[in-house]
């Protein structure tokens, strides 16, 4: 009985010490390190603000949902394999997977309808999810495909929309120059007078 009490007391002491170390001190240390100047924006999720309000993240692509799909004023991101409440990540489906092929064809047809083009004009990144499922960038080809619709629905001249695409194009992207959807949408919104 004496051994059982000693083992129980030793286990409780270890539990208490580990709780303090790993449940209190370690999280506080990580939080404090994240407050070092230069690290805070990344630690806080690289939040993009507009007029003092958070409007998204520069690292996480979220596809905007138009209030009126018939008058959609937004550039859209790549599709996401992550669903509501699911972690980021790829679908892990191969090119021969019937479900993946079917979903790609459905996406291609939907995007072709939305943009008023033939399905063969829809670029690959418009219908395939990135490895994380949350890529903030799209290809210049996908941005150019969406430009006429965005111009039509925002009232911003098409030439100006194309200038905004060019201004927002960087070397970072999906193997080719990419366009970050959030800053592009914010720039178009500003050019339209903030109406959308």
Image (cartoon, grey):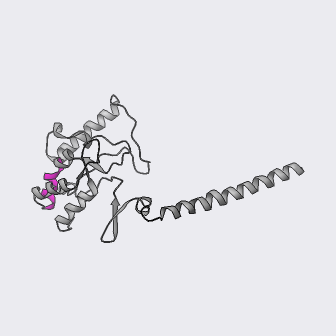
Which residue occupies the foreground of this view, 171 or 6? 171
Kindly give the residue lying farthest to the right in the view shown: 2
Image vertical order of residue 136 relative to residue 52, above or below? above
Measuring from the top left, give residue 178's x and y in whole percent.
Answer: 25, 48
Q: Quadrant of residue 56?
A: bottom left
Image vertical order of residue 175 relative to residue 57, above or below? above
Q: Is residue 175 magenta?
A: no
Dominant SS in magenta = helix
Residue visible at 19% across and 41% down in the picture: 122
Q: Quadrant of residue 89?
A: top left
Quadrant position of the C terminus in the picture = bottom left
Residue 153 left/right relative to 178 = left
Residue visible at 18% across and 38% down in the picture: 119
Residue 108 left/right relative to 82 = left
Measuring from the top left, give residue 55's x and y in whole percent.
Answer: 32, 63
Q: Which residues are magenta?
A: 145-154
Which residue occupies the foreground of this view, 141 or 92? 141
Residue visible at 28% across and 57% down in the picture: 182
Which residue occupies the foreground of this view, 122 or 3? 3
Kindly give the residue lying farthest to the top in the view shown: 96
């Amino acid at each position: 009985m004496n051994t059982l009490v000693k083992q129980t007391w030793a286990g409780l002491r270890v539990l208490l010490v580990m709780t303090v170390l790993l449940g209190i001190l370690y999280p506080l240390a990580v939080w404090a390190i994240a407050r070092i100047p230069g690290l805070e924006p990344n630690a806080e999720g690289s939040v993009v603000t507009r007029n003092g309000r958070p409007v998204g993240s520069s690292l996480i692509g979220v596809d905007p949902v138009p209030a009126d799909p018939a008058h959609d004023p937004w550039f859209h991101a790549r599709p996401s394999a992550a669903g509501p409440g699911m972690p980021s990540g790829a679908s892990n489906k191969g090119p021969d997977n019937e479900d993946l092929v079917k979903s790609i064809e459905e996406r291609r047809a939907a995007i072709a309808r939305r943009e008023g083009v033939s399905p063969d004009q829809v670029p690959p990144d418009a219908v395939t999810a990135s490895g994380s499922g949350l890529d903030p960038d799209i290809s210049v080809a996908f941005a150019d495909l969406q430009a006429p619709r965005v111009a039509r629905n925002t009232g911003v001249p098409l030439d100006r929309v194309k200038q905004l695409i060019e201004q927002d194009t960087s070397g970072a992207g999906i193997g080719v120059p990419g366009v970050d959807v959030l800053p592009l949408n914010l720039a178009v919104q500003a050019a339209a007078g903030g109406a959308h």
